[in-house]
Image (spheres, rainbow, N blue to C red):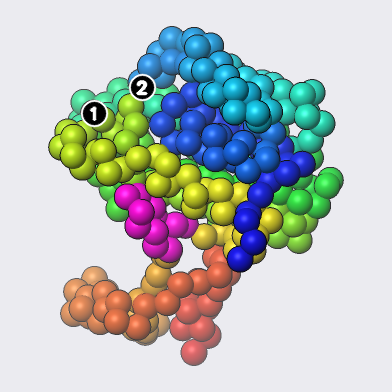
Amino acid sequence: MSEIRFDDRVAIVTGAGGGLGRAHALLLASRGAKVVVNDLGGTVDGEGASQKAADAVVKEITDAGGEAVASYDSVADFEGATKIVEAATKAFGRVDVLINNAGILRDVSFHKMTLDQWDAVLAVHLTGTMNVTKAAWPLLREQGYGRVVNTTSAAGLYGNFGQVNYGAAKLGIVGLTKSLAQEGFKKGIFCNCIAPVAKSRMTETIGLPEEVLNKLEPERVAPVAAFLASEACEVSGQVFAVGGGYVSRVEIVEAAGAVLGDEFGPEDVAAKLDALSDLSTAEPFANAMAAVQKALKAASS
């Protein structure tokens, strides 16, 4: 296969001042993309701001002969998201690729979590992903081309202790991505998710051994994001787990189930629980309407 390149393409990468975002930005730039390096420059929990992180990555790109500009705006409000997209159009005249990577952590067990801790995490991860995508969407639709790569997590797909806010936001991103994929398809806009495991400021807080963290370089995640951001990608609405060189498609599936009849009680559910839960013949669905067909079929039989 010929080399996947991004010549004449313009990419926005949020949260690109370090970790995964930096790796995404550097890889895209090394393959010809003009890159907007967005980073608020705050702490892991979202406090404070600094231009240093974004500026440092821009310097890495330009020192290597690439083209990049910095953006320091927050994804958490739509005004900031609009400025991020405007940074791309003012510097480079267009937007082709959007990698939504910005994130914060406010890890705490649910019974101790404050509403502010809930709101802050959803504002950056879920609403932030929506904000920047919403700001770029008219441009992508008008030109009939776009690649959007969003960032979910195993905590969203499967849950994780102490991350109710983070997990809810990350699974919300999956639903957002799958719906955007259906809306954007006819306009040439493909939207997918990665669920990465990589060494970063955020993962360094979870206590993994150093020898394990050293094998989880962000550079071993970035190629998947780059493929999904490229013209070579012809899939949309998909989720890919990636980390340490491992890559796997992740799918939400539904068991074959059983029809319990027109009138049934909780005892019938208990009696049939094993059959209802049997995933041996589980199948994915292309969209929500396909998923509800089983219920509609049962109701009409």
How far separated are the C-alphas under marks 1 and 2?
10 Å
Q: Residue at x 76, y 51 (%)?
A: 145
Per the picture, the main secondary structure of the magenta-coloured stretch is strand
Question: Percent from the top left, x then y, of residue 95?
Answer: 74, 37
59 to the left or right of 217: right
Cβ–Cβ under 8 Å for marks 1 and 2: yes
Give the residue at the far front of this rendering.
Answer: 64
Per the image, is 248 magenta? yes
The quarter of the displayed image where residue 111 is located: top left
Label 2: element kind: loop
Q: Earlier in the sequence, mark 1 or mark 2?
A: 2
Q: Is residue 218 visible?
A: yes
Amino acid residing under circle 2: Val
216 to the left or right of 148: left
Q: 179 or 269: nearer the eye?
A: 179
Question: Percent from the top left, x then y, of residue 9?
Answer: 73, 42
According to the picture, the residue beneath numbered tag 1 turns out to be 205
Graded by Cα atoms within 10 Å as few (under 14), some (14 to 19) or many (20 or more), the crowding at tag 2 reads some
Q: Which residues are magenta?
A: 239-249
- 117 vs 267: above or below: above
According to the picture, the residue beneath numbered tag 2 turns out to be 44
Q: Is residue 179 visible?
A: no
Q: 177 or 36: nearer the eye?
A: 36
Q: Residue at x 51, y 28 (%)?
A: 16
Q: 72 or 179: nearer the eye?
A: 72
Amino acid residing under circle 1: Thr
The quarter of the displayed image where residue 163 is located: top left
